[in-house]
Amino acid sequence: MAQATQAEETPAAIREPEPAVAASAAPGTIGNSEFDRDTAVTLRAPGVYGAELSEGWTIIRAVNGGYLLAMLGRALGEALPHPDPFTITAHYLTPSRPGPAEIRTGTVRTGRTMSTGQASLFQIADDGTEVERIRVLASYGDLSSLPEDIRTSAEPPSMPPYEDCLSTKDAPEGATPIPGSTAITQRLDLRLDPATAGWAVGAPSGRGEMRAWFGLADGRDADPLSLLLAVDGLPPTAFDLGLTGWVPTVELTAHIRCRPAPGPLRVAITTRNLAGGYLEEDAEIWDSEDRLVAQSRQLARALLG
């Protein structure tokens, strides 16, 4: 879960979030859930959409990057003639914060099977100036029209069953809480593979791996837009390297390969190289039918020392 603003300290363990801002207990469905309401956009003028960044998707003091990507992905899906993101690349320019925002979209090219567009999200800073927070370029198509021929050497991650993985309720007593907001953890049903959760008790493996079962807390099934959230929804692999502090995303590219089947997702993220204070994270997302439904790579900063 790469964070978009600086943290004063890092959690020593996964913490159970405060009940005061708990997600709704009502079951969610695609199109009618907290995620859909909180990523909604309103057309104001051709290519221009109003939005409200919810504090429910914040970590520390900023809005999660995957949530932002999903919101811009929704705006582009409404602006372009094709419904589904195939590939989307985001550059995170300045930390976003809860409150009003405006998304401006533009069509780069349209074709019979694919269209390409760009979008930027803007907010008003405290001094009254307009600030661009994130800029994306994306290609859209129709996932339902893709051929079913699959030739792959990729394999689903080896993980314990859902019930044997660790939720926020499994944080040990006396663990250091995350400073600031932990609201996003209440909106996710996240179960970490114990083999990649040693950092939470001060024993990181050093391998730079993070694996988890992933879903939305209200039970809403995954779709292409929520996959954009999932690629940035886990704790950063920097924690498993023994690093602490801020891990802001600089750039993230996601590929959506097919529409996910109902049921929990499995997310596996690895990093192989940290140099000059930057690391890459490669993510794979698998659905309940053992299909690779999304991939991503991001470049993030890691505070050293």
Image (cartoon, rainbow, N blue to C red):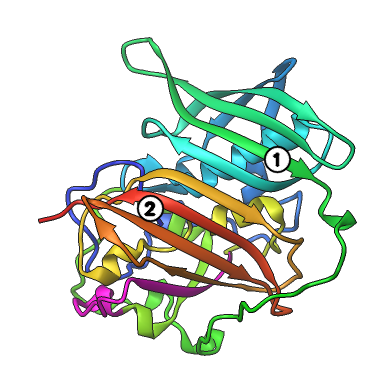
Report the quarter where the N terminus lies. bottom left
Give the answer, above or below, for where 112 lies relative to 156: above
Q: Is 269 positioned to the left or the right of 104 in the image?
A: left
Magenta stretch holds residue 212: yes
Task: Provide the residue designation for mark 2.
Answer: 2
Compare marks 2 and 1 and give the one earlier in the sequence: 2
Magenta stretch holds residue 81: no
Give the answer, above or below, for where 86 lies relative to 99: below
Residue drawn at (42%, 80%) of the image:
166
Badge 1 marks a residue whose secondary structure is strand
Q: Pick out the residue farthest to the left.
A: 305
Q: Position of residue 99 (x, y in %)?
A: 47, 29
Task: Provide the residue designation for mark 1.
Answer: 139
Q: Position of residue 122 (x, y in %)?
A: 49, 22
User: Do we see residue 17 in this rendering?
Assistant: yes
Most foreground residue, 128 or 87: 87
Q: Which picture quadrant has residue 155?
A: bottom right
Q: Pick out the residue farthest to the top.
A: 128
Are the residues flagged by discs 2 and 1 in contact, CB closer than 8 Å? Answer: no
Magenta stretch: give its range.
198-215
Most foreground residue, 149 or 29: 149
The three-letter code of the residue at mark 2 reads Ala
The three-letter code of the residue at mark 1 reads Ser
Q: Is 44 positioned to the left or the right of 184 in the image?
A: right
